[in-house]
Amino acid sequence: MRTSRRTFMITTAGVATGLALSRLAFADAAKVSEVDSTALALGYKIDATKVDKTKYAKYGAGQACSNCTFYQGKSIDAFAPCPMFGGKQVAGKGWCSAYSKKA
């Protein structure tokens, strides 16, 4: 069976598009939800301003995932991986009780 250049190019474009779309879908799926069991255990909130300050007295104004030791992204990233959640992505503006100020 002979494959023409045109068939090869169309197939390659289709595969590349499929990979790109699956990557986008996976990126959204890898974000931590507030109802995730680990998130519930650590009191994770996507928006740090919504933390229950009576339940989590450790929380202080200005604390956010983006300035935490465990945040594995740049401080300007909207989402980045966190080892506390098995490498799933947390919100830069989020917070959890494992917060530790970045040195």
Image (spheres, rainbow, N blue to C red):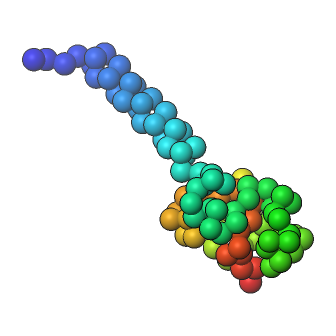
Who's the residue at 76% across and 71% down the image? 67
Q: How many marks?
A: 0
Q: Which quarter of the image is occupied by the C terminus?
A: bottom right
Point 53% across, 45% down: residue: 29
Q: In the shown orientation, is residue 52 left or right of residue 28?
A: right
Q: Residue at x 75, y 79 (%)?
A: 101
- The residue at the far right in this view is 61
Q: Position of residue 62 (x, y in %)?
A: 87, 70
Q: Among all residues in the image, which is located at the extreme bottom?
A: 103
Using the image, determine if residue 28 lies above or below residue 97.
Answer: above
In which quadrant of the rendered view does residue 2 lie? top left
Residue at image point 79% right, 56% down: 47
Is residue 51 something that shows in the picture? yes
List the single residue furthest toward the front.
Answer: 55
Q: Is residue 102 above or below residue 77?
A: below
- As drawn, is 92 to the left or to the right of 83? right
Is residue 76 visible in the rendered image? The answer is no
Q: Give the image quarter of residue 7.
A: top left
Q: Position of residue 43 (x, y in %)?
A: 70, 66
In front of the other: 39 or 70: 39
Quadrant into which the N terminus falls? top left
- Give the x, y percent position of residue 65: 72, 66
Reply above or below: 86 against 21: below
Out of 73 and 95, give the one closest to the viewer: 95
Q: Position of residue 102 (x, y in %)?
A: 73, 79
| 70 displayed left or right of 7 | right
Q: Nearer the viewer, residue 82 or 45?
A: 45
